[in-house]
Image (cartoon, helix red, strand yellow):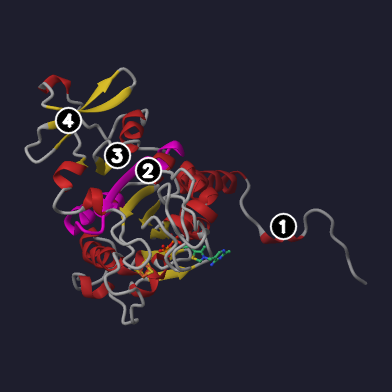
Amino acid sequence: MTTATAEPLTRKDFASPTAIRWCPGCGDYSILSTMQGILPGLGIPKENFVFVSGIGCSSRFPYYMNTYGFHTIHGRAPAVSSGVKLTNPDLQVWVITGDGDALSIGGNHFIHALRRNMDLKIILFNNRIYGLTKGQYSPTSGVGTVSPSTPYGSVDQPLSPISMALGAEAGFVARTSDNDVKHMGEVFAAAAAYKGAALVEVLQNCVIFADKVHEPYYGRPTRNDTLLYLKHGEPLRFGKEMEKGLVMDKFAMKSKTNPSEGEVLIHDEKEASGALGFYLSRLAHPEYPVPVGVFRNVERPVYHAGVRAQVDAAQAKNPPSLDKLFNSGSTWTVD
Ligand SMILES: Cc1ncc(C[n+]2csc(CCOP(=O)(O)OP(=O)(O)O)c2C)c(N)n1
Ligand code: SF4
């Protein structure tokens, strides 16, 4: 049931009194504050928000939100939140997860929530390390990462959560960063407005175990040259003077300085095949600028609507009756 809240909501309404246990300087704080800042503007009653998390530092998030929430088990937030959404489609369900939680133990659940287009807003805190368990490497750690579980340096190739989400056919896929709260707020609001599974990767700094891991591309001094802000319908340009642009060269996307106007690709988040988003998701530092913003934003059938339609059709054809159910199949009379 939806109850209208009389007073307009403010950020304070979403802050819980629970003491925060993240390390001072952790990027998680700005993500929390941004989330608390955008929810009042969504026009959704407070009691209709639910935050569901897995396990990790990032997954402590629901304790700090004054909303309904579940701190579930490792990698299984998509499963629990799918149940929440299916049984009560009026709720807006946010999933909070980390690169370890979503992409290691929870990889399978992550893929299928996106493939099914469960109406979940998935915020993936990517600090490229396991924070809670004291700094083991994760699926997004770079080659050569020295950690307690890779003492000689990781030889694993990292994966891109954005490529993975696009490969799973997600309809809304975006990236933002913990050091740009304005951008983060805009991306969270766009995810909230999307009907279906929305994946937002947040480049997040773990000040203890992977400090400054994103600094080479998202640091303030260089980011004009090393980040590319995706804007729907606008040329894919970057650089201090916007003097560089992305162009196609056979089957590869290339970065070119002073390209001619017609050469520069135009961003289209509605591109149906997902190919443009996928090309962009492959761009990585230092060869390319790192894209931030919305990679893909296309409509797809929403899972809970399909399930609801099946249930309604089945009930119309065969009205539910407990009495009939109890007396169906093998029944016995005990004398
Ligand atoms: C079944 C199970 N296996 C392993 C663990 C140990 N564990 C807890 S959190 C975590 C990784 C968390 O990393 P990430 O998702 O990147 O979150 P962060 O702490 O960096 O925010 C692991 C392996 C666990 N709690 N449960
Ligand atoms: S260990 Fe890292 S991710 Fe965890 S709270 Fe501390 S700084 Fe944040």
User: Looking at the rendering, in which quadrant would you find the C terminus?
Assistant: bottom right
Mark pair 1, 4: CA separation: 65 Å
Amino acid type of disc 3?
Phe
Q: Pinpoint residue 133: horizontal percent, then vertical percent.
A: 48, 68
Dot 4 surroundings within 10 Å: few (below 14), some, or many (20 or more)?
Answer: many
Residue interval drawn in magenta: 165-192
- Residue 16 lies within the magenta run: no
Residue pictured at 54% horizontal, 55% vertical: 105
Mark pair 2, 3: CA separation: 8 Å
Farthest residue to the front: give it: 152
The kind of secondary structure element at disc 4 is: strand
Report if residue 195 is visible in the image.
Answer: yes
The kind of secondary structure element at disc 3 is: strand
Per the rendering, the mark at residue 295 is 3
Badge 1 or badge 3: first in the primary sequence: 3
Q: Pinpoint residue 124: horizontal percent, then vertical percent.
A: 38, 55
Report if residue 227 is visible in the image.
Answer: no
Give the residue at mark 1: 325
Mark 2 in CB contact with mark 3 (< 8 angstroms): yes
Residue 217 versus residue 46: which sits nearer the camera? 217
Give the residue at mark 2: 162
Farthest residue to the top: give it: 250
Give the residue at mark 4: 245
Mark pair 4, 2: CA separation: 21 Å
Label 2, ligand 1: CB separation under 8 Å: no
